[in-house]
Amino acid sequence: MLSIMTKPDFHITAEQHFDEMVALRRDFHQYPELGFQETRTSGIVAQQLADLGFEVQRGLAKTGVVGLLVGARPGPTILLRFDMDALPVQEETDLPYKSVNPGVMHACGHDGHTAMGLTLAKIMAEQQAQMAGTLKFMFQPAEEGLGGAFAMIADGVLDNPRPDAALAMHIWTPEQVGKVRIVDGPCMASSSVFTLTVQGKGGHGAAPHQAKDPILAAAHIVVALQSIVSRNTNPQDSVVVSIGQFAAGTTFNVIPDRAILKGTVRSYNQALHRQTYRRILEMAQNMATAFSCTATMETVAIVAAVVNAEEPTAVVRQAATLVMGAENIVEHRTMASEDMGYILEEIPGCYFFVGGGNAAKGLTYPHHHPKFDFDERAMIDGVALMAQAVADYVLPVGNSR
């Protein structure tokens, strides 16, 4: 049975650190850095962890930082992951702390995640003498589609010591501040990219009968692929097939010899993912043949599905009940993707979402939007919830788990 930790009151503690956490977040927001380039950010992270007495390791996956906080007594090792990278987005907000780096913006909340991680590190450092176990803080570069988690795993982030459980969170503006999304099993989809090359025969736009038009074939392929979800997938399963890029031709009156389609597949199930790719290739080839063209496909796997394990998820749910109230726990999955899935393939854990939207303040722009922002009080909820979950593992006083 899970215990309810009654002391310390982590929500009060997180509230006490709010001003410094906001200052950290705004500093990171003003000076964003792209994946594998987080030199300034990781330098601040490493220095603050060292000042708190952590054992600090730098240079994993180029700019990743690991901080170990070893308790006074033996116990489990808990991995706590926070991402640091920004996006190649030109910021369009009027914030006084808006990005000073042209074309780079924290448009997904990772500035908040890094600030929350450092604040949590400070709070848990104050509990070190009471801890039975080890906390492994993982500050990760390059989450945004660049494989930062995979690179950190390759560099040994899951070794010496190997974690017994892993926790991670994301500020989530589709949910209002004060809410938290926690779900058992799959919570984010696996994601992969495909490129279809439709090869035809170029010609003059005034004589299309002398050409083999790859644009026409590719256009029919785009339409045909939409039937995979509606007619080839069980309605009780979840899969997304989206075309995000269609490139062909150089001018208005020349039929090109090829067209390029790029898209993504999202699902919670690897077998379904593979089945979807088979249907994409079959449809593309058959449709191209119908227009006297050919089609080939290349695929790139990006991230695995994020799948929450039963026991760590129960710990987080119990913590959320205490910190935020059961009425504020929302069950919801998303077809968005996250490379935390690689870690959860190796280590049982829980990934949850902390509500950061606030319609009354106009904080409604979606993630990756150039006007993205979130209610900074969400950071209080995130830190308090994470601290409470961690306490259930490493602060055993009064713990019947």
Image (tube, rainbow, N blue to C red):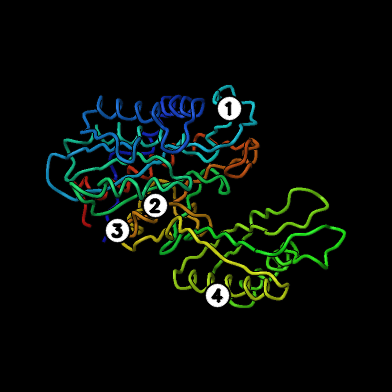
Q: Position of residue 87 (x, y in %)?
A: 53, 38
How much space separates mark 3 and mark 1, taking CA atoms? 37 Å
Structural crowding at the residue carrying mark 1, measured as other residues with C-alpha within 10 Å and reported as few (<14), some (14–19) or many (≥20): few
| Tag shown at residue 346 | 3
Tag 4: amino acid: Gln
Where is mark 1, residue-wise? 102
Of the two numbered discs 2 and 3 on the same chain, state the one appearing first in sequence. Answer: 2
Where is mark 4, residue-wise? 236
In the displayed structure, would residue 121 be above or below residue 367?
above
In terms of image quadrants, where is residue 297?
bottom right
Of the two numbered discs 1 and 4 on the same chain, state the one appearing first in sequence. Answer: 1
Structural crowding at the residue carrying mark 4, measured as other residues with C-alpha within 10 Å and reported as few (<14), some (14–19) or many (≥20): few
| Circle 2 SS class | helix
Where is mark 2, residue-wise? 340
Nearer mark to the viewer, of 3 and 1 = 1
In this rendering, position of residue 299 left or right of residue 80: right
Residue at the (60%, 38%) spot, across then down: 372
Of the two numbered discs 3 and 4 on the same chain, state the one appearing first in sequence. Answer: 4
Q: Position of residue 256 (x, y in %)?
A: 73, 56
Say which of 105 and 326 sits in front: 105
Tag 1: amino acid: Pro
Of the two numbered discs 1 and 2 on the same chain, state the one appearing first in sequence. Answer: 1
Looking at the image, how many numbered discs can be counted on the residues? 4
Q: Are marks 1 and 2 in contact (CB under 8 Å)?
A: no
Nearer mark to the viewer, of 1 and 4 = 1
Residue at the (30%, 49%) spot, across then down: 153
How much space separates mark 2 and mark 4, taking CA atoms? 25 Å
Structural crowding at the residue carrying mark 3, measured as other residues with C-alpha within 10 Å and reported as few (<14), some (14–19) or many (≥20): some
How much space separates mark 1 and mark 4, taking CA atoms? 44 Å
| Circle 3 SS class | helix
In terms of image quadrants, where is residue 294?
bottom right
How much space separates mark 2 and mark 3, taking CA atoms? 10 Å
